[in-house]
Each structure stands twice: as structure tokens, then as C-alpha cells.
Image (cartoon, helix red, strand yellow):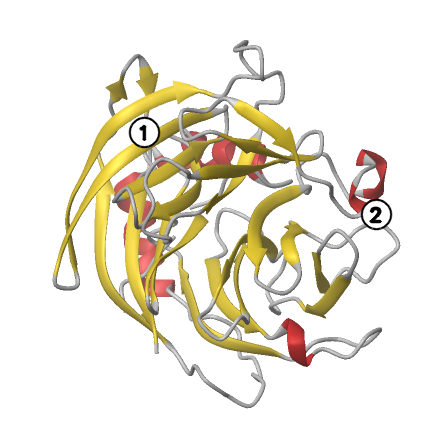
Amino acid sequence: MRLWFTASNTPYKTPYKAQLLAVIKPFWCLLVTALILTACSAPPVTAATPKAYTQIKLLSQFTLPRKVFKELAISEISGLAWDQDEQLLYAISDHGRLFHFKLTVEGDTIQAVDPVFAAVLVDHKGKPLKLRDSEGLFALNTNNKKSGDTQLVVSFEHGPRIIRFTPQGRQLGVIPINKALQTAKNYRSPNSMLESVAYHPKYGFITAPERSLKGQPDKVQMIYSAQRQWSFPAYPATNSAVTGLEILPDQSVLVLERAWSGLFNPMVISLRRVDLNACAKAELCAVQDLGVYSSLIQIDNFEGLAKFRDNLYLMISDDGDRELLRTQLSLFKVE
């Protein structure tokens, strides 16, 4: 399956990109040859007993061209949301840039992704938002057969904050987050804060730091609502971090994790299922691995995750604003 991925706003972002540009560019052909000969697979993992879903099936991929639209560069996309009522795909970049795309899907194939709107996020007075490290995105009121009532919810890594916006990027209000997440010093690093956000029908807004907080086991991931928290085993790859959350049709959570531990190690992307309703308090939740992919050759860092319709989902990679990387949109089915 050709579902390969990149690395971006994590504790490993800066050294990764510096090494990538310094090493790969002058020795690209030699490196590719070596990587093909040494390509490896993801580490083994024991999944929970499958329930409603068993695997991920890739349907289509589309690479967004690197270009400027409305004076804003389409790059470093880290959050996605689909609006069924408006037939728009929303995307947020690391630097507070908001985009709307017209998405053309024929059958199970992405045919076109055309930008139709671009703006920077602004506060309630219309001034550019000072919090610019926008990472996670979720859209509300997107499938109620009403037009004009959509709201966008954005999580900010540096703050940390979760804020509601209009589809045009104007601030509406702040969403309360769990007390444990409110203080920056509780996180393992400034780049391991709130990378994702989603709305759960039972628990309300949920979010996850990239990695567990200080004082918690390093090999455990955490999901938080305003009042509760859940934990589950991290995918067993070095530096695995949560980069995206979405809700499956049965109200379980689709978790996107990304792991990268150095230039000559594979990027590992895992799509996993956690059923919050089945988790006992103070115990690790069972986790089911629906799809795990690794590659030494194509290193697309998928950070944005969005439900498209039914059991179809979209995922997008952050190109890190680097020429050698790409913004790759993938359409897949959770079977």
C-alpha cells in the first residue's frame, strides 16, 4: 500500500528538517539507492480484538501544488475539516493561515483540490491573532442541512488554547480545556502540546498532547475532555506522537500517530482505534491498530485528519515549507 508520510511541528521538527536539507539534497540519488536496499517495515504490535472496524484501505492520493493563493502560501498544513453542507474542505497551517478548498472526488478518486478562500486568523477585533502555532482543526454544524452556521475549532500548540472561529477566521470564543493542559510547564516540551482537537458526541471537545505530560509514562498516550482523561499504549515506535483525532461512526476515536527518530530511520504512521466508552477509569484503554505504515523513502508527515462522509476519511501531510517535502492529501476507508 502506497500510504507514505513527512515530519513537522514536533520536538523533532527542527533537527529533522536541517538534516534532511543538508544530507539529502547533495546526495539524493545515492541515498535513494541505499534506502531501497534497506527499506524496512513497521515494528510488530499486538492489537486489541477487532470489533466494528478491522483495517484501513487507501483509495486515492493527491499532491497539492506548492503555490501562493491570495498572498498566502499553501504550505505547512496541519489540520483538516470537511463541511458537508457547504461542500468545502477547510485547512489550517502552522502559522495561522486558513484555507478553503473545493474538493472534487469522483468515485473513490480525488480529482482536484482547488483553493477558493484564504485568510489569516484574527481576534474578535479583527486583528491578526498572536497565537499563530495553529495545529488541530475541527468543524461544527457541518451536516445539519443548514447553510451559514459552520464554526471552526482550532487547537494551538503554544498557549495552549482551543478557540472557536467563523469560517472566515474571526475569533468567536475560547473553549475550556482540562486543568492539566492549561499550564505550559506540564508538557514535555514546547512542541509537544495540543496538536489535535475533535468533538465527541458524549464527552464534548477532546484533545491530545503529542506526548504524555510530565510525570506520566512516556510510552502512554493521553486523550482529554474538559473533565476527564483516558490513556492508552503509544504505538511501539520511538518518539510516537499523537497528531490527529477524529470520530468514527460508532463514536470510538480514530487516532493518528507519527513516529520519527532520525534521518536513517523510517517514518512510522499509525491509524488506531480507541473506544472511550469501553475504557474503565484509571486503566489503560484497549487500542486497535487499523493501519500501520513505514518508509525510508517517502517521508510524508501526516498531521491533519478529517471525516469526509460515512466511513471515508481524509488525511494531509505537513510539508514543513520545504522544497523536498510535499502536501499530500489521502482519501481512505475505515473498513
Q: Is residue 240 visible?
A: yes
Where does the image place residue 41, in percent across and percent down from the top left? 42, 71
Mark drawn on residue 180: 2
Which residue lies at the image location 66% right of the left edge and 61% below the top edge?
203
* Quadrant of the rendering where the C terminus is positioned: bottom left
Residue, x 36% and y 53% (percent of image)?
143
Q: Amino acid at mark 1?
A: Glu
Query: Measured from the top left, where is residue 264 in percent x and y?
Result: 48, 52
Task: Answer left or right for 180 relative to 125.
Answer: right
Residue 36: x %, y % from top left:
30, 60
Circle 1: is it few (<14), some (14-19), or many (20+) Cα within 10 Å? few
- Where does the image place residue 138, in percent across and percent down from the top left? 49, 45
Q: Amino acid at mark 2?
A: Ala
Instruction: Look at the picture and state if 125 lies above or below 6.
Output: above
**Mark closer to the observer (2, 1):** 2
Q: Would residue 322 be seen by someone viewing this image from the given angle?
A: no
Task: Say which element carries label 2.
Answer: helix
Farthest residue to the front: give it.
146
Q: Vertically, is 193 above or below 50?
A: above
Q: Residue at x 55, y 52 (%)?
A: 198
Please give left or right for residue 286 compared with residue 74 in the image.
right
Q: From this view, report whether residue 242 is shown above or below residue 80.
A: below
Numbered mark located on residue 208 in the image: none
- Front residue (pair 268, 91): 91
Few, some or many C-alpha atoms within 10 Å of disc 2 (few <14, some 14-19, many ≥20)?
Answer: some
Residue 323, numbered circle = 1
Residue 249 versus residue 189: which sits nearer the camera? 249
Query: Residue 206 is drawn in which quadrant?
Result: bottom right
The tag earlier along the polypeptide, 2 or 1, is 2
Foreground of the two, 34 or 327: 327
**SS for tag 1?**
loop
- Do residues under tags 2 and 1 come within 8 Å of each other at their CB atoms? no
